[in-house]
Amino acid sequence: MTEGDNARHGDSTVYGMPSYEDRQVAVDEVHARPYPLIVPPRVLVQLAFMNEGNPAKDKATLAEISSRTGAPLPDQNTPVHGLTFEQGDLHCEKHTEFSTYLWCTPLDPETGNPVGDDPFKHGFTPPGPVVCGIRLDVVAWTEETAKYIDRFDPISRCHSIVEDGMADIVTDFRQDADGLTRILILDRGLTPIRLGALAQRLLEIETYRTLALLGIPLVRARGPHLRNIEKRLAAITDEMRNTARRNSETLLSELTDLSAELEANTVSSLYRFGASRAYYEIVEERLAALGETLVPGCYRWRSFLHRRIAPAMRACRAVEERQASLSDKLARATTLLRSWIDVQIERQNSDLLASMNNRAKLQLRLQQTVEGLSVAAISYYVIGLLAYVMKGIPGLHNIVSTELAMSVLVPVVVLAIWWTVRRIRHSHGDKAQKS
């Protein structure tokens, strides 16, 4: 085997050099969904199941089909699987939230029915609820098969010539008795690969247009709810204008609850609306790739679907924009109310500081009063002690009377004690300023 063969088979080197770890995934993605080779007459039945991205459900379904038909079980680590058995081919393709199962088998031109047993009707275990079902008949164009066109509803019949006039595609987007959308390809000489590419493109158009329109029920459910939120927001903002300063906490609680309710609903619809946009873009791409030529008296696929899907997509975008606008309005109302609450808190803090200042002044006055009383009390005790000392000195009363000496010492002692207390208070004040 050559180096080029090794690279094609997932070797970790390219031209003898180490390859990037995710390179092979990117290389294989181009060939991940090969077109089926179709030779008319052929019938393709495809069912799409919503499996919420759970691969275990598809594994169980494929294991059941493999056991029932005797076909070897494919490698289920890849997103695309194929089973071949006597009744035809079955292809499974896994997507983010859904998976498709395509049964391709010969068509009996006499009865118009598929050849062999339908694998979807004999013990088939679906991986989830069906979201889309399609039956696509591929027959060669003849004057006889051209009459098949009349089987479609003329009111919604879409008939176009594609592939440079080499094929007719017809549908009315209505479901038959089995719930399948019927599509017809009249082949005028396409190669099997081009016919397979055309068939896959039509199957994808029907599948993705159905998935894109899954956002409509959500739009209808969100409409009344958003109107209710808008009314409640209007009532709250009107009350803010009149009584916000008196009921600010109550209003803030109501706004917070309203914002939480809106955000919860927005998050729950975020994925569905985003998926609808993505699916619609795929439908637009596939329709543009058809290159349709108008058949007089019939709709073109693109014009018919665009007329019906585009308004639905605009409705989805309108709901998304409405939710975003409401979220902004709630945020602005909450910010305004919080500003008023902050002003109230600042006013309360100012009043509290003023009250604390008054208390400090009263405490200062009381302290000064206490200091004055303490000077008098200390002076009284000091003079009393001095009196005992002077009475105990022998001969002092012969020089000067004790009463006269005490009278002279009283103002001196009072001044000394007052000065000492003042020094102590000033020293404490200096330490407080330094700290």
Image (cartoon, rainbow, N blue to C red):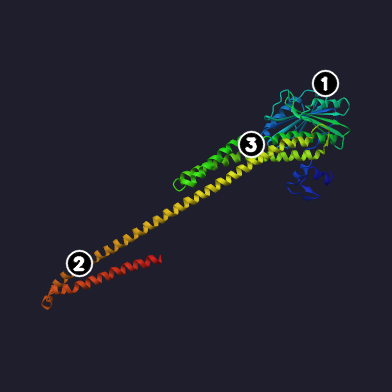
What residue sits 44% from the left and 52% below the top? 345
The answer to whether one can see residue 208 in this image is no
* Residue closest to the eye, 234 or 215: 234
Q: Position of residue 103 (x, y in %)?
A: 77, 29
User: Which element carries disc 2, helix, strand or loop?
Assistant: helix
Please state the total of marks drawn on the protein image: 3
SS for tag 1? loop
Dot 3 falls on a residue whose secondary structure is helix
Q: Is residue 147 visible?
A: yes
Judge by depth and name the residue closer to the eye, 305 or 108: 305
Of tags 2 and 3, the one toward the viewer is: 3
Q: Are marks 2 and 3 in contact (CB under 8 Å)?
A: no
Identify whether 378 is placed above or below 57: below
- The residue indicated by pointer 3 is 219
The alpha-carbon separation of the residues under discs 2 and 1 comes to 133 Å
Label located before the other in sequence (1 or 3): 1
Question: Spatial distance from mark 1 to mark 3, Cα to Cα?
Answer: 43 Å
Please provide percent x and percent y for residue 138: 83, 29
Q: Position of residue 279 (x, y in %)?
A: 71, 38
Q: Quadrant of residue 375?
A: bottom left
**Residue in the foreground of this view, choosing between 60 and 420:** 420
Q: Is residue 407 above or below residue 51?
A: below
Quarter of the image where one finds residue 395: bottom left
Residue type at mark 2: give it: Tyr
CA gap, disc 2 and disc 3: 93 Å
Q: Is residue 149 found left or right of 251 in the rendered image?
A: right
Residue density around tag 2, few if under 14, some if 14–19, many if 20 or more, within 10 Å: some
Residue that mark 1 sits on: 111
Mark 2 or 1, closer to the camera: 1
- Tell me the amino acid under the disc marked 3: Val
Q: Disc 2 vs disc 1: Cβ atoms closer than 8 Å? A: no
Residue on which the image places disc 2: 380
